[in-house]
Amino acid sequence: MKTLLSKGWLSASYAFLYLPIAVLVVFSFNSARQSMVWSGFTWQWYTALLADVELGAAFGLSLRIAVLSATASVVLGTLAAFVLSHYRRFAGRALFNGMASAPLVMPEVIIGLSLLLMLVSVERWFGFPQRGMATVCIGHTVLGMAYATVVIQSRLREMNPSYAEAAMDLGCKPHQVFFLVTLPNLAQALVSAWLLAFTLSLDNVVLSGFLSGPGYSTMPTVIFSRARLGLDPRVNAVATLTVLVVSAAVILSTLYKARAERLRRQSA
């Protein structure tokens, strides 16, 4: 009985999480403009999506921002995690640790507003950056870096320090140890952190709304603005394509990590 209840609870939890996504995918092929009234199968909304210049441009902009911000988040998160893991005592460590993890618990409205005020002040002083792709990338990097730091730091704590010590004994310099020993052992964590930061950037609405400028609307902000005026079947189509892209990335990442773990066990 206990096993049956646990399985039922687990099934209900998965249904609560993924049934809305399944409904969205199904109704992206609905021929009616009213999204919740099924009237037949059609590909017309995907065809209409190809002709939607605004949504296509927003989707391309979101992808570019997500790739750039995820890459920057992983680079900065790796450096922050390395410092916090290998240097236990230095002036300002508590402040640095708090600032690195603050975006995890701080409301995005506060982050977006504070970044907006700071970037507007910087623009007045130096004339750069203007509100657009660069400012959105900065905001998404601030958020993604905090998540990347946590993921990478947890992996660094699990690493055996004898690898780095052995490399030092064999004559490697500290930077060689970092690039030849530490980074290869962090490969799985780096991929996971990159995918997490990429996903956070791709669907972010709040920071994008604060930091984007005229002509630089991301896909989530365009979808949100259209949803306020009524459900658009083309939104279902682009959401379905996004689900497919993210699902493919997750599957490839899982296969890569499984292969890397298998190779690691074989070489151990």
Image: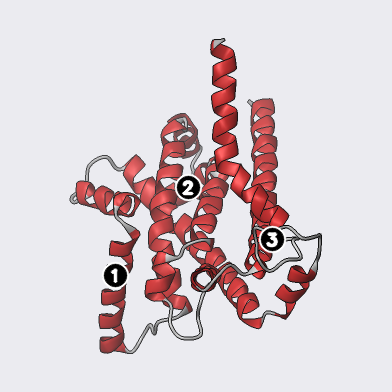
Q: Is residue 141 above or below residue 106?
A: below
Q: Amino acid at mark 2?
A: Phe
Q: Amino acid at mark 3?
A: Leu
Residue 6 x, y percent position in the rendering:
54, 19
Q: Which residue is mark 3?
A: 241
Secondary structure, mark 2, is helix
Distance of mark 1 from mark 3, alpha carbons? Answer: 31 Å
Distance of mark 2 from mark 1, alpha carbons? Answer: 37 Å
Q: Is residue 79 above or below residue 227?
A: above
Query: Which residue is painted at 68% across and 59% down in the image?
Result: 37
Query: Which residue is painted at 50% across and 68% down in the image?
Result: 224
Q: Amino acid at mark 1?
A: Leu
Distance of mark 3 from mark 2, alpha carbons? Answer: 38 Å
Q: Which residue is mark 1?
A: 113
Residue 118 x, y percent position in the rendering:
26, 75
The circle drawn on residue 178 is 2
Q: Quadrant of the N terminus?
A: top right
The circle drawn on residue 16 is none
Q: Is residue 184 visible?
A: no
Q: Is residue 151 left or right of residue 226?
A: left
